[in-house]
């Protein structure tokens, strides 16, 4: 069993304390995303997605992910909104996550956070808050966190991004319902720099080849979690 609740809660408490001491700041403002969230809600009114699906949430790497093409045999929901930070997904949890009652959640976030100057500890604390809320409302839902990617455009921030990944990875390894999807090394070339063939022209977002790689790594995580079989049953 991975589960070690004492270690989880101790890590969370210490991290929140460290963040509070070192980074006093105003509450995160997610108001700029209200229009995006409203569009999701309008779409839901026309046709509500099925429960027990696999929900993808986070920033533009989620928004641009062609889920129907990548996972044609699975029931998926895309609730990515480009440019968002992890705290934004926390802010809108009840409107774009909890209401769908997904069997699994795939999250990609933290990239924009680090680029905006947030510390690895702050991003980790936001992820831990996301997990805590999901765990309280949807105790059986599994969460797959896709590692913050090494990109050409933001290569100068890779050290901070990898520190964030390490914090989240350790947290996931202590809980049976959390899965860290490590796409960092598969995206690196022999020169230990991001592989150019995986990126769009902006050197930040993925191209088709990049998403094919992510699909493979995430599918392995789905197999490990057991959610592949459940998702296929949902789609019948």
Image (cartoon, rainbow, N blue to C red):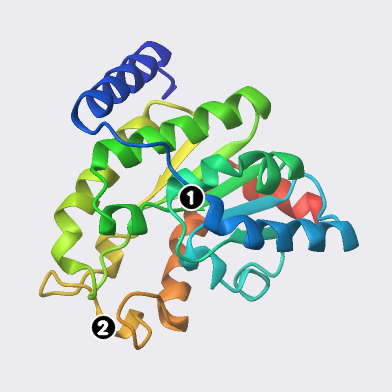
Quarter placement of the C terminus? bottom right
- First of labels 2, 1 by sequence position: 2
The circle drawn on residue 91 is none
Compared across the picture, whether 214 is left or right of 98 comes to left
Quarter placement of the N terminus? top left
The secondary element bearing badge 2 is classed as helix
Quadrant in the picture for residue 232: bottom right
Q: How far across and how far down the image is residue 74, in percent?
A: 70, 60
Q: How far across and how far down the image is residue 156, in percent?
A: 14, 65
In this orientation, which residue lies closer to the viewer: 89 or 212? 89
Q: Is residue 13 above or below residue 92?
A: above
- Gap between marks 2 and 1 measured at Cα: 25 Å
The secondary element bearing badge 1 is classed as helix
State whether residue 197 appears in this view.
yes
Residue visible at 36% across and 37% down in the picture: 26
The circle drawn on residue 221 is 1
Residue to which mark 2 is pinned: 196
Q: How far across and how far down the image is residue 51, in percent?
A: 80, 46
Q: Is residue 5 above or below residue 104?
A: above
Q: In this rendering, which labeled residue sits more in front, label 2 or label 1?
A: 2
In this orientation, which residue lies closer to the viewer: 159 or 230? 159
Number of labels in the image equals 2
Residue visible at 67% across and 27% down in the picture: 137
Residue visible at 18% across and 68% down in the picture: 155
In this orientation, which residue lies closer to the viewer: 121 or 91? 91
Q: How far across and how far down the image is residue 86, in percent?
A: 44, 47
């Amino acid at each position: 069993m991975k589960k070690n609740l004492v270690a989880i809660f101790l890590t969370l408490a210490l991290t929140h304390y460290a963040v509070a001491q070192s980074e006093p700041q105003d509450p995160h403002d997610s108001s700029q995303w209200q229009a995006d969230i409203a569009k999701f809600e309008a779409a839901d009114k026309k046709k509500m997605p099925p429960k027990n699906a696999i929900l993808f949430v986070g920033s533009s790497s989620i928004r641009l992910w062609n889920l129907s093409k990548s996972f044609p045999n699975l029931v998926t929901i895309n609730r990515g909104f480009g440019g968002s930070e992890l705290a934004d997904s926390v802010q809108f949890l009840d409107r774009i996550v909890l209401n769908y009652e997904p069997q699994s959640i795939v999250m990609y976030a933290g990239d924009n956070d680090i680029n905006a100057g947030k510390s690895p500890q702050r991003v980790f604390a936001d992820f831990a808050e996301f997990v805590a809320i999901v765990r309280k409302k949807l105790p059986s839902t599994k969460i797959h966190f896709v590692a913050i990617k090494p990109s050409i455009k933001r290569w100068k921030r890779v050290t901070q991004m990898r520190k964030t990944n390490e914090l989240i990875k350790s947290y996931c390894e202590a809980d049976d319902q959390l899965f860290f999807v490590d796409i960092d090394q598969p995206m690196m070339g022999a020169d230990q720099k991001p592989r150019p063939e995986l990126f769009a022209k902006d050197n930040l977002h993925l191209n088709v080849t990049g998403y094919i790689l992510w699909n493979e790594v995430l599918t392995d995580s789905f197999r490990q979690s057991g959610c592949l079989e459940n998702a296929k049953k949902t789609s019948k």
